[in-house]
Amino acid sequence: MDELARLLAERACERLIVHYCRLVDFGNATQIADLFCEDGEWRGVDLHLQGRDQIRAWFSEREQLTRRVSRHICTNLAVDLVSDDEAESLCYMVNYRHDSRDGEPQLPVTLEVPKFVGELHDRFRRTPDGWRFASRTVELSFVRRRLGS
């Protein structure tokens, strides 16, 4: 693969990560499934989703949490091509989240410490529709605990 093609592939994968964050943060989480391969996989601490249908179903429920305001911040991102059609990446992720208590929007949103800090381990695959997530694994490094828990 020539240098330009490599850079374009890396950038396409980086854009998937950014697009994912924007979808979940701005109330369009259901569309996240479209960023995954048909057999894509999403893994979290207590959750494993296999295939686009499961991913869409779970993120559709997330989208219904209109009381929640979140911002996912991804940094230290590095995409490495494994082959012409596969890539992987690691980035750090910080999630700020606020849930309104009475269901009404509160402006400005009270800024709290991050909900969690962790790592996103992504694998990508080139498809006829462009680059897609083959898998995403969320590993938490620091988690804010509720008082008393």
Image: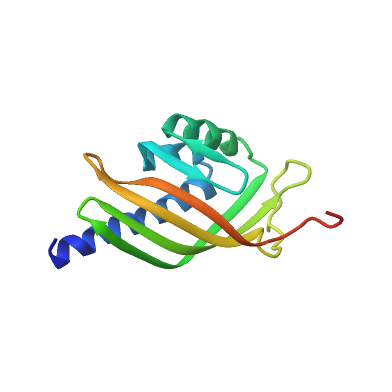
Q: Number of numbered discs present?
A: 0
**Is residue 60 shown above or below 117?**
above
**Is residue 22 shown above or below 38?**
below
Q: Quadrant of the N terminus?
A: bottom left
Q: Residue furthest bottom?
A: 76
Residue at x 65% of width, y 46% of height: 68
Q: Residue furthest left?
A: 2
Name which quarter of the figure residue 63 lies in: top right
Residue at x 31% of width, y 63% of height: 80
**Percent position of residue 106, x then y:** 71, 51
Q: Quadrant of the C terminus?
A: bottom right
Left or right relative to 128: residue 23:
right
Viewer-closest of 27 and 89:
89
Viewer-closest of 121 and 27:
121
Q: Residue furthest front?
A: 82
**Percent position of residue 18, x then y:** 42, 56
Name which quarter of the figure residue 5 lies in: bottom left
**Percent position of residue 84, x then y:** 19, 54
Residue at x 49% of width, y 31% of height: 54
**Percent position of residue 107, x then y:** 68, 55
